[in-house]
Amino acid sequence: MPIVQRAFQDRSTDTRKMAAQIIGNMYSLTDQKDLAPYLPSVTPGLKASLLDPVPEVRTVSAKALGAMVKGMGESCFEDLLPWLMETLTYEQSSVDRSGAAQGLAEVMAGLGVEKLEKLMPEIVATASKVDIAPHVRDGYIMMFNYLPITFGDKFTPYVGPIIPCILKALADENEFVRDTALRAGQRVISMYAETAIALLLPQLEQGLFDDLWRIRFSSVQLLGDLLFHISGVTGKMTTETASEDDNFGTAQSNKAIITALGVDRRNRVLAGLYMGRSDTQLVVRQASLHVWKIVVSNTPRTLREILPTLFGLLLGFLASTCADKRTIAARTLGDLVRKLGEKILPEIIPILEEGLRSQKSDERQGVCIGLSEIMKSTSRDAVLFFSESLVPTARKALCDPLEEVREAAAKTFEQLHSTIGHQALEDILPFLLKQLDDEEVSEFALDGLKQVMAVKSRVVLPYLVPKLTTPPVNTRVLAFLSSVAGDALTRHLGVILPAVMLALKEKLGTPDEQLEMANCQAVILSVEDDTGHRIIIEDLLEATRSPEVGMRQAAAIILNMYCSRSKADYSSHLRSLVSGLIRLFNDSSPVVLEESWDALNAITKLDAGNQLALIEELHKEIRFIGNECKGEHVPGFCLPKRGVTSILPVLREGVLTGSPEQKEEAAKGLGLVIRLTSADALRPSVVSITGPLIRILGDRFNWTVKAALLETLSLLLGKVGIALKPFLPQLQTTFTKALQDSNRGVRLKAADALGKLISIHVKVDPLFTELLNGIRAVEDPGIRDTMLQALRFVIQGAGSKVDAAIRKNLVSLLLSMLGHDEDNTRISTAGCLGELCAFLTDEELNTVLQQCLLADVSGIDWMVRHGRSLALSVAVNVAPSRLCAGRYSNEVQDMILSNAVADRIPIAMSGIRGMGFLMKYHIETGSGQLPPRLSSLLIKCLQNPCSDIRLVAEKMIWWANKEPRPPLEPQTIKPILKALLDNTKDKNTVVRAYSDQAIVNLLKMRRGEELLQSLSKILDVASLEALNECSRRSLRKLACQADSVEQVDDTILT
């Protein structure tokens, strides 16, 4: 015994093997009482040999252990079974698990069948569990490899229960478990092929059709082994040949299989193998083909023999909930048609038709898949021959209540179209369209169309679009189909867009309007490619120019949907969109206005880069609509609760972050918008507009930018003055600072803006004081002139609010500068003084008139007289009721007429301007007549040799007779008209042009030609001819045009 014990530890494999054999034989041949004392010393060595890496050592050790247990009895080995069970599930080594399994099998054999009956349920149950660790399952499956060897035929009753365990393990995700299961399966087949066919085959057949491909694969392998065993071939030969239909089977092997299995079972097994050839998994296909080639001698003949059985299985597969099974059945059908020819179609198609009437949705779906495969494998002529059966089947399936069936039917349609072409469209699509009218199936038919579109949009759309776009337009179907049409939709947009617009136009204002809009939205949002976006934008913008208001409304609504909801990048079309949408802001329809406003609002909320790129286009289009509405308010800018906020982000971005050129463009655009918008619509946006303008004015920019910004602020003040009160301090600071700017244009704009700002001022005195001090202190004549102009504008706006002491200082300063050497300073001072006359007290006015404006001019410097003359003219214009009526009227008229005939041209021109202002006063207050002296002097001025004098006289007649002032009496007009007619032939083109303008206003020709006709009756022949000639040449043309807005007061600097 010591020698044997040492032998177990020897390095030599043979020594260890012989030691185990000796122990085994000793326990078999000797009395147990003699060997009992040595048991504790031998067992450890035997256990170690059982886990030996060499398989032969493990086998001999296992047998020795079995012999010991058999000889000594289980009672002597209390810890052996627990140790074996524990090692059976050892995680680290498959060798240990294998040794333990083999040892346990031998021990169980030594203990007899009773032990097998006791332990087998536990082993089978554990091996079947899916929630245990893979190494545990592997150990228990190994038992199925060794138990058949130890028990032989006694194990036959357990073959049935263990086959499912083995098959399940064959599908395990762990490769070592799969390998163990395969060896166990092969062991069972090699030992029980003849005796346990009834037990093995049902399980293997079931495995052939399992949902899991690994079980199908393993079942094919084991079934192959079984068939090879029965037919007496090895199955190890290669079956790789050029054709999949080459066979290596013999009639003898076929006979052996029939004998062993019986005809029915053999048919089922071969049918399962044949279906395996069309499996979705390559390994299953390869294994099935290998087995088929070896056991079958003639494929077509065998197929005909198993056809009924095969069809029964196929229908079951077609009805399966497993997609793989349905696909396998469909492929097998196609393969059958290829193998057996089209002669079997009469047998197949009725069965499939019947299947479509099944209550099971999976079976109906399977029928569609099968039909597709059959058509794929059949000639066009055969499909056409059976089309009477195929077409109704496809139609019915496309309207099936279940989506999966309709989806499969669409693939059937695709195959049908691929086989028979256009005929498929004619046979199926009109039927589907008709079904749309049937409430019960319309929803299914619509989805059927959608499924067909998804697989064959390029073919189906050209067929459907003309039918769907013929009035009444079916936008519901178009919307559904568009969602799956893809790029094919773009080709038909030219037809679809007008149709959906027409449909929407007809539904506007009806209960169906919202539904129709949703359908239109679905169509346009389905377009994905750039070409499609270009077509949508161009066609919709074109439709917005339609003379028909309904079409414009529909186009604007769809355009708004597109701009607001499309996730596509249409940045390359922004310019055309902005241009088209802005032009709709003058539309007469409220719907068009609101929808175009919303669309523009959607596209202007972009990133800064895109906004800046739009500024130039936006300004151009705002100019265009401004001209179109002739300077009136643009309806699209005056929508309640909307106003100008749709375009404000772009212009604001331009002002804040644009280049100097863009800032200027944005500011001008903003100014234009302010002009064209009502005060109510502007108010909500005042803060958004004013803040950026003030901020940028504080920075250093080109004078053109500053001038544009100041003009915009000035316009805003003029429109919504009081709404800007929160900004009053910043605005005043900004404007007074701009008065000191080096550029004259900026200064003039600042002066104008201050004049507007003063109207919302409560305490005006500080501003007057600041301007007075500035005028006294400034040395630069240019800045002084513009400050004087600013003073004039603030007097105009708040002269009545100024304190008496400041007013006195004002008068004193202005009188001292009235004869200034600098022409512009003198002119600006005169303008200020004249403007102030409207706000002086009677006493102050009397002093100014008597001591200055109406004082004797003899002996004074011509510059002083010029200043006085200008101031008097302005005073007559701004305060005619105080100077042209009452105590001063005659003196004022005498002084103005005296100035008009002065030798110095500037004085004479200022006097003639005064005459024009007097003329305006008499026209507005008189009965259509002028004082004779005024009238005769005007005529003399018109005949003056100096063209400047003639021109000023014409301008003042034109200005004094502007609309809506009443006309003069024909007798008063007659001499003035004759002088003007003479001037229409003047050598100077400007004089000629202004004489025409003056005649048009004098005769009120923009109202009509009544006054002209009256004059025609009292004119002499020569004058009448001249008037008619002049009317024909230019007067009527001028009368059709808007009157000029030229400023005639030359004391306002420009």
Image (cartoon, rainbow, N blue to C red):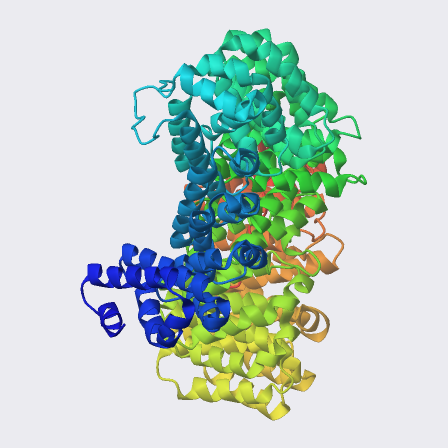
Q: Residue furthest left?
A: 12
Q: Quadrant of residue 235?
A: top left
* Foreground residue among 638 and 950: 638
* Foreground residue among 739 and 60: 60
At 45% from the left and 38% from the top, the residue drawn is 189
At 46% from the left and 58% from the top, the residue drawn is 110
Q: Quadrant of residue 1054?
A: bottom left
**Left-right relation of 477 to 512:** left
Give the percent coordinates (x, y) of residue 762. Answer: 65, 84
Give the percent coordinates (x, y) of residue 830. Answer: 50, 74
Q: Would you say residue 901 is visible in this rendering?
A: no
At 67% from the left and 38% from the top, the residue drawn is 519
Q: Would you say residue 517 is visible in this rendering?
A: yes
Give the percent coordinates (x, y) of residue 840. Answer: 64, 82
Is 928 situated above or below 344?
Answer: below
**Left-right relation of 547 to 96:** right
* Foreground residue among 545 and 419: 419
Q: Residue furthest bottom?
A: 805
Picture quarter with the N terminus? bottom left
At 60% from the left and 37% from the top, the residue drawn is 523
